[in-house]
Image (cartoon, grey):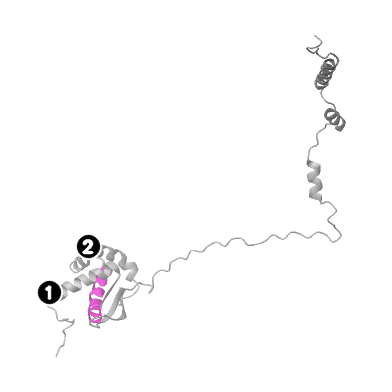
Amino acid sequence: MRHRKSGVKLNRTTSHRQAMFRNMVTSLFKHDRIKTTDAKAKELRRWADHIVTLAKRGDLHARRLAMSIVREKDVVHKLFEEASERFGTFNGGYTRMIKIGRRPGDTAAMTLVELVRSDGAKPAKKKKTKKKADTSVEVQPSAPVGATDDQPKEEEVQAEASIPVEDVPAETEEAEVAAPPADSKQDDSAEKIESEDTKKDPEPSDAEK
């Protein structure tokens, strides 16, 4: 009879088995989850629950016992700091086992072992909401029924009234454009006189000389 003989041997020696589970429990608390075979996962759960119980105690003796099993000091210190918040609301059942099928090759049953939070779920991530663009269209008020296109709008009339007008009489501008400059007249008369003189007094030819 196999009474009072807890644990599994897994066809390994005592030293090999203890070293293997010490490595596995260290990886579990470091990464929060590991993948292993079904038989190892069931035994690993016992080791993990024992370490969490020590972490919830939190005294110096419990810390030294945990460090004799877990191989990394940083993992132990982190576990003892978070144990009261993460596992403080319930006793036992600190791990979850999820069967993920069989391993290719030897078809061994595989299991995912992960730590459980006190609220039973991971904190939900906040979703980022994008602001929607304004698609509203401004509706202009319709014109009155009796109004026509020929009638000027009040805004156009006000705009025309606000344009400054130069105080220059129109008659003076036309006079300046129509009157040619005096110098040009004198030049034209001088050219005409010269042309007449040349016509009256032609030069004598060689025969007359």
Residue 84 in picture, x, y percent from top left: 32, 67
Task: Indicate yes or no whether the magenta region holds residue 40.
Answer: yes
SS of the residue under disc 1: helix
> Can you tell which mark lies on residue 15?
1
With respect to residue 203, does 141 lie above or below?
below
With respect to residue 117, does 198 lie above or below?
above
With respect to residue 42, does 29 lie above or below?
above
With respect to residue 81, does 175 lie above or below?
above
| Mark 2 or mark 1, whichever is nearer to me | 1
Residues 69 and 134: in front is 134
Disc 1 marks which amino acid? Ser
Residue 136 in picture, x, y percent from top left: 65, 62
* Distance Cα–Cα, label 2 vs label 1: 21 Å
Disc 2 marks which amino acid? Lys
> Can you tell which mark lies on residue 165?
none
Q: Residues within 10 Å of mark 1 (few under 14, many from 20)?
A: few
Query: Which residue range is magenta in the image?
Result: 37-56
Which comes before the other along the chain, label 2 or label 1?
1
Split into 4 quadrants, where in the image is the C terminus? top right
58 with respect to 68 (left or right): right
Q: Residue furthest front?
A: 207
Residue 74 in picture, x, y percent from top left: 24, 61
